Image: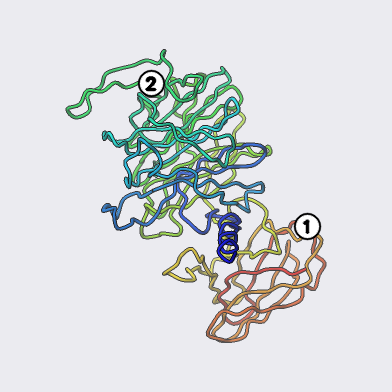
Amino acid sequence: MKRIAFLLLFAISMMNVAMAQNPIVRNQFTADPTARVFNGKVYLYPSHDILPPEDYDRKDWFCMADYHVFSSENLTDWTDHGMIVTQNKVPWVRPNSYSMWAPDCVYRNGKYYFYFPSAPKAGGGFAVGVAIADNPEGPFVPEPEPIKGINGIDPCVLQASDGNAYIFWGNGRCAKLKENMKELADDNPREMVRWGNREMEMVGVNCLQGLPNRQAEGPFAFEYNGNYYLTYPYVREKTEVLAYAMSKNPMGPYEYKGLIMEEQPNGCWTNHHSIINYKGQWYLFYHHNYYSPNDDKRRSACIEKLSFNADGTIQLVKQTLRGVGVSDAFKEIQIDRYSSISNRGVEFAYLDTLNRFDGWKTVMTERNAFVQYNQVDFSNGAKGLVCRAQSQGGAKVSIYADGEKIASVKVKAGKAFGDFSCKVKKAVKGVKDLKVVLDKGDAEIDYIIFKK
Ligand code: FUB
């Protein structure tokens, strides 16, 4: 009985992982985030970076053993539905190859098709397989063999308005899929290419030929307003940018249009993305290595809003910490994921450098230093708040909602984090932008949470 209760508790804790802001998943690494909208919800199919275990000797390389799927209705709270495909249960994948790289998932004819690259038992680089489910959360059943004709990584499937499904992979290569979604169509162009001393048949077309494409990977194709977009990362100077090209045909030719996101500011070598429209707003999912600043092979998924110009071109997207979505005032508000800050007197640090998943603290050292955190939902009002903080000499911190002071909290001097409460003095309802200002002293703030 005890064992069943324990297993139940474990299962519940696995499923309900409350997360928000950037990065959006806060208890594990999540790279190459492919988002899809199914049944009115956003489903996220990322790669699952892990720290290299003992039986994997490439300690500074990508290391992925399985895939999880997550879902969200508000882009703020994400549910982890657990593991859906693992390297040791796919018949064609070399066990313990830790090469479950960037996946995709699409819905067609009543089934969900999950496409993933990995290292085949037969050798020869990467192949792409498919696993099939009746629901977006699985269970997914892998096909016994990989898709014939694809030697490469990073599959993405575009379901075009011409009724066909097209699969893109690797360096912008594209081929039409058969209606069964498990094989390449017979009418794809084919060419023999020499790879080292090996002759191999390449199927489909290279849509990035002649376009900026240095080390291009991770293609993500979609259709909008009569245009096909082929978006992809490539290395411009030091790290990957996200770029895009447009065409009137799914298989090109594509015309290069420019960047969606600049190089990673901290030197993280890869970026990898997907683009969705959810409830009328476009979003860009991408990754960064926030939880692993010294190791760019352990990455974390992030989201920003994305906009089109009237001519169909895409506006450059800036990386933010705040990300998207409205935060619930009655859940922990991690102000270190700020919208804006003062020029002086505020910095951020990991709470625990040995466990970075614990997150960050806001370190305020100068009078009038501030952190602004936008889009907090107070619903029908808050009566009080708790500020989890510590201070060497004591501090007073004031909280403003849409520019109006609503509370001031005293943080007593001490050597450890504590919870400091105060009343909310003004009626504050609905969605507000929050500003946290240091009135005096010094304060390290973990989070703020309002009380009803
Ligand atoms: O995650 C492993 C590889 O790194 C992906 O397949 C690439 O797109 C890059 O993000």
Badge 2: residue crowd in 10 Å (few <14, some 14–19, many ≥20)? many
Q: Does the beta carbon of the residue at mark 2 sit less than 8 Å from ligand 1?
A: no
**How far is disc 1 from disc 2 in space, using C-alphas?**
52 Å
The residue located at (63%, 61%) in the rendering is 373
The residue to which callout 2 is attached is 205
Residue 142 falls left or right of residue 323: left
The amino acid type, in three-letter code, at marker 1 is: Gly
In what quadrant of the picture does the C terminus appear?
bottom right
> Disc 1 or 2, which lies upstream in sequence?
2
From this view, report whether residue 450 is shown above or below residue 164: below
User: Which quadrant of the view contains residue 168?
Assistant: top left
Badge 1: residue crowd in 10 Å (few <14, some 14–19, many ≥20)? few
The residue to which callout 1 is attached is 430
Residue 278 falls left or right of residue 168: right
Tags 1 and 2 touching, CB below 8 Å: no
Q: Nearer the viewer, residue 207 or 364?
A: 207
Q: Quadrant of ligand 1?
A: top left
Q: Nearer the viewer, residue 98 or 11?
A: 11
From this view, report whether residue 266 is shown above or below residue 333: above
From this view, report whether residue 94 is shown above or below residue 16: above
> Helix, strand, or loop for circle 2?
strand
The residue located at (51%, 59%) in the rendering is 27
